[in-house]
Image (cartoon, rainbow, N blue to C red):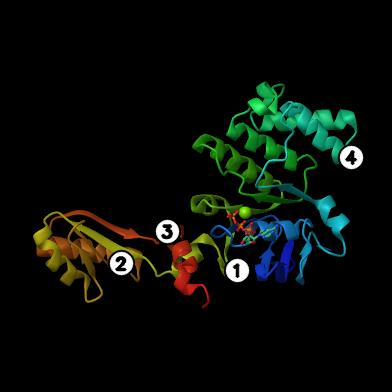
Amino acid sequence: MTYTIEAHGLVKRFGARAALDGFDLSVPEGTVHGLLGPNGAGKTTAVRVLTTLLRPDAGAARVAGFDVVRDGDQVRRHIGLVGQHAALDEVLSGRANLEMFGRLSHLRPAAAARRAGELLDRFGLGDTGKKAVKNYSGGMRRRLDLAAGLILSPPVLFLDEPTTGLDPRGRAEVWSAVRDLVARGTTVLLTTQYLEEADQLAHRVSVVHEGRQVAEGTPEELKKTVGGDRVEIVVHDPADLPAAEALLGPSAQGDPDTRRVSAPASDRMATLTRVVQDLRDSGIAADDVAIRRPTLDEVFLHLTSSDRSHA
Ligand SMILES: Nc1ncnc2c1ncn2[C@@H]1O[C@H](COP(=O)(O)OP(=O)(O)OP(=O)(O)O)[C@@H](O)[C@H]1O
Ligand SMILES: [Mg+2]
């Protein structure tokens, strides 16, 4: 299997501190890969090494088939980068910013103008393209920034926190733009603080902690690693809590405050059917019965909590 983005044992030190400390990554062509990690985990450093802005101290990485150290020019020709902090000219209009990015990417003036117009339309900025960027809202800036990274329709796109600071509508617009790109074959690496974003957009996710990948998989696979599904009953009458616990077996855990009892569920549908039947047979009134999957938030907290950090 060949990967569009791959990294092996990357190390990047700043003074005594290793921002990357044996970082590995494999991203297949045409997929969205999410990097999740707490502040300072090394996500931006990884993106900067992969986009040739930083030289690694050790390890190797290839993007679009080119080595990030030896073939930096080739890598740069195949990628787009939307950084964590917008590189926009405040005084210029959105349109002029995009035209400037196009010219910097060696497009002819007419082609740069055409591409700027297309991208302004695609990101819903067509009407505001003439306004100076200093008068844009945060969401408009992020969309313009994303547009700037797409000037050359690169096959590989790096997005460092593409939706931080956006309202739900702005976020949904960026997500749909990313999905659209992937449908056209673009490979996307994105970092995010929003687990829902990774859940929604990413085919696979790496959890990064202290400069290393500590887990990798589809969002579903990662959720399974923190324990499987649980069956949950909310009893109507708190007095029924012990009976509901008995019904779910020895590993049941009850919480009088929320009237909730839960236990591992090995087989989703069979467990649900059996529990509903058992509740009816024993005359316990329940307000709710459900099978619950762990959320990506629980996975993230489990993997990046400090007591696991040197495991
Ligand atoms: N240019 C630099 N000089 C010194 N230290 C740096 C530099 N860039 C990053 N670091 C340090 O390296 C570590 C990783 O930083 P990085 O920005 O990669 O984290 P991050 O995962 O992107 O965090 P965030 O979620 O806050 O964006 C941090 O401890 C940071 O302070
Ligand atoms: Mg960062």
Q: Earlier in the sequence, mark 2 or mark 4?
A: 4
Give residue 11's quadrant in the image: bottom right
Crowdedness near tag 1: few (<14), some (14–19) or many (≥20) residues, C-alpha within 10 Å: many
Q: Residue at x 76, y 66 (%)?
A: 56
Q: Nearer the viewer, residue 278 or 175?
A: 175
Q: For the residues labelled 3 and 4, say whether their Cβ atoms are less than 8 Å apart.
A: no
Distance between mark 3 and mark 1 Cα atoms: 19 Å
Location of residue 266 in the rendering, given as x and y in whole percent from the top left corner: 35, 71
Q: Quick check: 274 left or right of 28?
A: left
Disc 4 is placed on an element classified as loop
Nearer the camera: disc 2 or disc 4: 4
Is 8 displayed left or right of 39 in the figure?
right
Label disc, if present, on residue 213 of the rendered structure: 1
Q: Quadrant of the N terminus?
A: bottom right
Residue 28 is left or right of residue 282, and the answer is: right
What is the distance, in whole Å, between disc 3 and disc 2 at their CAs?
22 Å
Q: Amino acid at mark 1?
A: Gln
**Hey, what amino acid is under mark 3?**
Thr
Nearer the N terminus, badge 3 or badge 2? Answer: 2
Q: Residue at x 73, y 26 (%)?
A: 93
Beta carbon at label 2 within 8 Å of ligand 1 = no
Q: Which residue is mark 4?
A: 106
- Disc number for residue 264: none
Residue picked out by circle 3? 295
Q: Residues within 10 Å of mark 4 (few under 14, many from 20)?
A: few
Q: Nearer the viewer, residue 279 or 53?
A: 53
- Can you say whether 149 is above or below 308 in the image? above
**Front: mark 2 or 1:** 1
